[in-house]
Structures are given as structure tokens and as C-alpha cells.
């Protein structure tokens, strides 16, 4: 039953779709620095620094805090009118000096904002000046990424900061180690942990960067720690230049860093889809196995077998159910493939991150789906809602902002992606790997079967499903 009476924020969304060129309504993305700040938190003893006004920095921190339910430490250049007119060099120089003196990080990761990008501040020149003036202690580092928010999205910002780690830190030391670099993509701390665990099961020594596990999903200890225990060490980021290879997960979020490492240090890379779902996880495991020359242990085969077992046991529930998705491109590509492999029909797919390749890729994945498929990059949640009014679905998957559509159209919503501000679990339980696939299946089944139970007439209310 639709919530006509309760419809509030979205009651003006019309069914008729009109092409818009210069207006986004309810965007399916957020701004670049949020991704850059998230990536920087994946370096051990790193303080992210927002080069712009306090308003931007407060927003970036609160967006991450709302999603992870953890305090997010960062600093700001605190632009005022003066910096906005004359540039932010003096602010950043003083900030670098203060931060190393007061908070004692090992590294500062500076990202720009719309304002400092529009002014045109030359961050590498400012960092060089800070080093010349002795504001950066020996064996300490300042890296940066340009993150103008009027292009790309939080995923672009993440990718730029991860590439910054390579550009500033990765170095060849003359001989190759047997380690493999893993660039996990813009995924949850739980996912990063799971990717490391799978590599460990295979017996492959790795360097993962960035690594936010135990930073943004750490335990309650009763004591505040400015720099939590997790994160990739600077020493490992430097050593990544001597690894035997790189496996980058998610072409958009991890591809630029992997290619930069190949160019700078001649570390060959393989760029894969995020290991979400059966097929993409198979590809990840097989790539690691091949590069490292190891065999896949029984423990991983058993995990895979369980996933296949649930898919076959419950196939009748998945079969030809229609789904609408919104989120980030790397996640959506793997998730769409997984849903198609389950015999589900993902028919409306929107990402706020621009990219023509995304639309082509989704069309390729869904070409066997016997139903028209709408896909848009960049699109917004307003458009997705309009598509839903014209062609309803059985299930929504996307971030917290989708809950308004779910309420108005009375469609179950599985929270997936970024940000999730009204539920917990995402930072503790992975959706990558075979175990993550099982978790996704459980969520999909719970949503569909709960709805079936709710709507079933008495005579068709089943005990065994
Ligand atoms: S001004 Fe730009 S950088 Fe700052 S919060 Fe807004 S979009 Fe993000």
C-alpha cells in the first residue's frame, strides 16, 4: 500500500520524466573531499587536513561521523575573507607548523576544497616551502590531493588521495619483495578487513592501502585516541614501490593509484571489479592465486560452496524480482552483475558520479535481462523516483537518502553504499568476498520474504518458505 497520506518531501515528484541539463535534485553522490578524508584516515598516524573554510571541513567530518558512528579527526586551514582573496598559503604554513607541534602525527594529508581550487593555491609549492622553513620535522611527511568538488564525486576524491599516497611516498628500493599491493577501493573498514583475511587464507603477503579497519570500526576502550591502532604505515606505503605486483579493486577508486605505481616504480597491476558477489570474488581469488603462485585452500572453497548453496536453495525467491539501485559506480557494477547472476532484474540504476563507461558497462551486464533497463551517470534520486513511478520494483538498494522513496512508494529498502546514517552494521560486517555475498543474500531474502509475509492473505501465509 502506498503511503499517499504520509508522503511528504517527495510529494511533488511528477511521473512524467523531462530531460534536465542544469539541475540536480537529490544527488546520488557527495563531495570530493569526503572521499579524500576517508582515504587519508586509512594511513596510520595521519591527520587529514582540509584546505578551505571551516564550513567545508565541518561537513566532511560530520558526513563521515554520521556514517561510521566514530569521531573523525581532521584539521582545517580555516579560511576567512583574507585567505579567500589573497590565497591560503599563510594559513596552510601555520597549520602545518601547529599540527606537527600540537598533535604529533607522522603524516598530514592535505586535500583542497572548491574555494582553494578556485583561488588556485599551489599546494606542492606550499608543502615545499613548509619543508624549507623547517615546519615539517625530519622523517615526517605532508602529501596532498586536488579535490575540487565541482567535478567528480566522493569516489573521485578518494581515488585522488590514494594516488597522492603513491605519488609522494612509494619508492623502489632496488629489489622486488614477494608482497602484493592490495588497493581495496572505496569500501567499508569491514570490507578491507575481509579482503585482507582472504589474502591471508591464500597465504599471500600483502600491503593494503589505504586501510581504515580498526580506525573507523575500532573497539570501545574507554579512552580517546587521536590516532587509532589501524591504518597502513608510512613505511609500508614507501615499500609498496618494491612489491611484486598490485591488485586494484574498483577501476574508478583504485585504478589511478595502481597505474601511477606502475609508471613510477614499475610495479605491474591488475585492475579488477570490486569483489562483491560470486563472479567478482572468483575473479579476485583467481587473480591473487595466479600472481602469487599459490593454491586455493579448502577453507575458501567451503565459503564459496556455502554461497552457491544458498543461491540454489532460495532461487525461487530471487527469480525475476525487479530491483532499483543507486550508489557508486564500482559497487554498482559488481552488484548488478551479482543480481543478474541470481536471475533478478536490476532495471533502474543511477549513480551521481559522471562517467560514460559506467552506462556502457551496465548495459553490457544487463543485456540478457528480458526487460528494458534504465541507467544514468550522472543521474539523481529524483530521476530514479520518476522511473519507479512509471515502472515499480520489488526492492530498492542504496544509501540512506533512498528511504524517502521507499516510504512514499512502499518498497523495501536494503541500505547499501555511502552514506548509511540510520542503521549500523556496514562498518562491522562485509559485503565483499563469499561471506559478504552471503550477507547480501540474507538481506535480500529478509526484505523480500518479510514483505511477502506482511502482504500475504491468511490462506497463503506460509510457515515454511
Ligand atoms: S564548498 Fe565544495 S568542498 Fe566545500 S563542502 Fe561544498 S562541495 Fe564540498
Image (cartoon, rainbow, N blue to C red):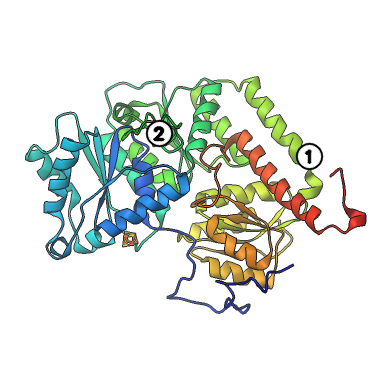
Q: Residue under circle 2?
A: 268
Say whether residue 277 is left or right of residue 188: right
Q: Position of residue 34 (x, y in %)?
A: 37, 51
Total marks in image: 2
Say above or below: 397 vs 245. below
Q: Position of residue 122 (x, y in %)?
A: 17, 53
Say whether residue 323 is left or right of residue 37: right
Q: Position of residue 192 (x, y in %)?
A: 48, 35
Say whether residue 62 is left or right of residue 427: left
Please tell me the numbered disc located at residue 120: none
- Image quarter where the C terminus lies is top right
- Is the CB of mark 2 within 8 Å of ligand 1? no
Q: Residue under circle 1?
A: 312
Foreground pick, 41 / 348 = 41
Residue sitting at x 43%, y 47%: 253
Q: Can residue 186 be seen in this snapshot?
A: no
- Image quarter where the N terminus lies is bottom right
Give the secondary structure at mark 1.
helix
Say whether residue 320 is left or right of residue 328: right
Where residue 294 sits, quadrant-wise, is: top right
Q: Residues within 10 Å of mark 2 (few under 14, many from 20)?
A: some
Q: Can residue 451 be seen in this snapshot?
A: yes
Amino acid at each position: 500500500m502506498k503511503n499517499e497520506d504520509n508522503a511528504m518531501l517527495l510529494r511533488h515528484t511528477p511521473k512524467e520524466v523531462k530531460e534536465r541539463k542544469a539541475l540536480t535534485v537529490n544527488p546520488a553522490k557527495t563531495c570530493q573531499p569526503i572521499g579524500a578524508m576517508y582515504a587519508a584516515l586509512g594511513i596510520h598516524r595521519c591527520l587529514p587536513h582540509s584546505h578551505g573554510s571551516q564550513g567545508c571541513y565541518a561537513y566532511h567530518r560530520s558526513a563521515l561521523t554520521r556514517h561510521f558512528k566514530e569521531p573523525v579527526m581532521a584539521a582545517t586551514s580555516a579560511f576567512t575573507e583574507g585567505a579567500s582573496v589573497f590565497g591560503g598559503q599563510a594559513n596552510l604554513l601555520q597549520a602545518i607548523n601547529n599540527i606537527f607541534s600540537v598533535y604529533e602525527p607522522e603524516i598530514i594529508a592535505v586535500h583542497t576544497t572548491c574555494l582553494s581550487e578556485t583561488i588556485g593555491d599551489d599546494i606542492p609549492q606550499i608543502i615545499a616551502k613548509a619543508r624549507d622553513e623547517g615546519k615539517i620535522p625530519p622523517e615526517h611527511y605532508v602529501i596532498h590531493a586536488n579535490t575540487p568538488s565541482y567535478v567528480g564525486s566522493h569516489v573521485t576524491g578518494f581515488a585522488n588521495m590514494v594516488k597522492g599516497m603513491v605519488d609522494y611516498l612509494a619508492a623502489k628500493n632496488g629489489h622486488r619483495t614477494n608482497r602484493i599491493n592490495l588497493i581495496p577501493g572505496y569500501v567499508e573498514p569491514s570490507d578491507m578487513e575481509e579482503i585482507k583475511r582472504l589474502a591471508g587464507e591464500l597465504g599471500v603477503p600483502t600491503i593494503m592501502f589505504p586501510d581504515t579497519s580498526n580506525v573507523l570500526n575500532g573497539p570501545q576502550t574507554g579512552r580517546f585516541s587521536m590516532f587509532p591502532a589501524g591504518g597502513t604505515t608510512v613505511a609500508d606505503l614507501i615499500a609498496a614501490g618494491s612489491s611484486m605486483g598490485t591488485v586494484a579493486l574498483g577501476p574508478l577508486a583504485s585504478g589511478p593509484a595502481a597505474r601511477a605505481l606502475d609508471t613510477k616504480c614499475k610495479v605491474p597491476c591488475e585492475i579488477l571489479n570490486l569483489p562483491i558477489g560470486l563472479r567478482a570474488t572468483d575473479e579476485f581469488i583467481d587473480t591473487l592465486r595466479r600472481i602469487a603462485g599459490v593454491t586455493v585452500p579448502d577453507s575458501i572453497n567451503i565459503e564459496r560452496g556455502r554461497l552457491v548453496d544458498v543461491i540454489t536453495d532460495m532461487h525461487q525467491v530471487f527469480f525475476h524480482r525487479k530491483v532499483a539501485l543507486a550508489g557508486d559506480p564500482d559497487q554498482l557494477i559488481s552488484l548488478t552483475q551479482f543480481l543478474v547472476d541470481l536471475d533478478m532484474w536490476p532495471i533502474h540504476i543511477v549513480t551521481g558520479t559522471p562517467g560514460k563507461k559506467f552506462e556502457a558497462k551496465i548495459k553490457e551486464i544487463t543485456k540478457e535481462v528480458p526487460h528494458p533497463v534504465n541507467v544514468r551517470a550522472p543521474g539523481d534520486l529524483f530521476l530514479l523516483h520518476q522511473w519507479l513511478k512509471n515502472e515499480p520494483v520489488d526492492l530498492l538498494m542504496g544509501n540512506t537518502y533512498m528511504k524517502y522513496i521507499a516510504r512514499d512508494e512502499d518498497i523495501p529498502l536494503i541500505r547499501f553504499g555511502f552514506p548509511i546514517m540510520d542503521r549500523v552494521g556496514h562498518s562491522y560486517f562485509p559485503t565483499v568476498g563469499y561471506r559478504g555475498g552471503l550477507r547480501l543474500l540474507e538481506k535480500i531474502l529478509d526484505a523480500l520474504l518479510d514483505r511477502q509475509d506482511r502482504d500475504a492473505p491468511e490462506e497463503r501465509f506460509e510457515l515454511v518458505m
